[in-house]
Image (tube, grey):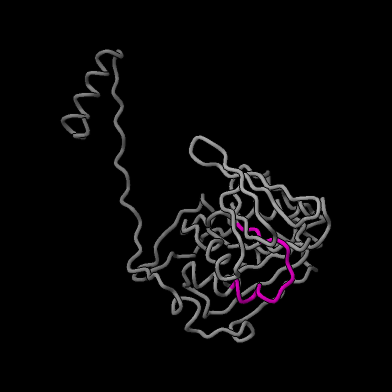
Amino acid sequence: MNILVCLKQTPDTETKIKVKEGEKKIDEEGVNFVVNPYDEYAIEEALKIKEKYSGEVTIICLGPKRAEQSIRTGLAMGVDKAIHLTDPAFEGGDSLAVAKALAKAIKDLEYDLILCGKQAVDDDCAQVGTALAELLGLPQVNVVTKLELSDDQKRATAHREVEGATEVVETTLPAVISCQKGLNEPRYPSLPGIMKAKKKELKPIDLATLGLEASEVGEAGSKTKIIEMFLPPERKAGRVIEGEVPEASKELVKLLHEEAKVV
């Protein structure tokens, strides 16, 4: 099977984020960027399928030059090769603009399955996979926690969690599947894998090579615009109510009623 994995580089969730003064983006100085955590599940699932059925796994990533580091992480995990869509014109794009660029790059490739994370942890939009499937005319199943392929590798059965139950969906392949936590346990890159990753193919593609107009991608091609970016106000310190439970409970109710005004 030939499997494509869509990867995005995002800030580490433990990194302290600052907004760049006077601009509508974060200050990247000191920020640790990593593979989007949900995309790690997509990479792992692709590798598991490859190990079972053979084939090839390719990462496709849209992002700045620094994203190459995260792409190499995927290659070190065992991915065979990668495509990097990198051009200043791609910057600032919303989910649709990103999906347009990815779809254009994918259109002429040979693939049996496209995997992606259910969402990126920086913008939490969870729309690129859906838009990509629509642009490519493919079926899609989102937020998948279990994936099984038929013996002939022409169909897939996906399990997805819904409120109070598990939904089982069957689809023909190729399809776009977005991966949720619980699907698998992503492996760590091994030392041999890290060394091999340095020699694996990583193909950069700019806007001209992709064949799209600058007006179709990046901020210019986005349907949604960022008007302002700011951090939420800091939370006030909590209060500890001391004393025996009966008296403390009464004091808590009083505070919730008179100060917090929530009861």
The quarter of the rendered structure image containing the C terminus is top left
For this rendering, which residue is in front, 52 or 68? 52
Task: State the extent of the magenta-drawn residues as a range.
Answer: 102-116
**Is 111 one of the magenta-colored residues?**
yes
Which of the two residues, 248 or 154, is positioned nearer the viewer here? Answer: 154
Rendering coords of residue 143 (x, y %): 56, 49
Question: Which sits in the foreground, 247 or 80?
Answer: 80
> Which residue is at 47% across, 83% downward?
215
The quadrant where residue 175 appears? bottom right
User: x, y (%) of residue 54?
Assistant: 84, 57
Left or right: where does residue 64 sit relative to residue 187? left
Q: Which residue is drawn at 29% across and 20% down?
A: 242
Name above or below for residue 194 compared with residue 236.
below
In this view of the protein, which residue sits in the foreground, 228 or 119? Answer: 119
Figure quadrant of the N terminus: bottom right
Number of numbered markers:
0
x then y, percent, for residue 161: 55, 42
Name the residue: 80% across, 50% down. Answer: 151
For the point 57% across and 75% down, the residue is 101
Q: Quadrant of residue 153?
A: bottom right
Q: x and y percent of residue 34 in the render?
A: 59, 57
| Residue 128 lies in the magenta-colored region | no
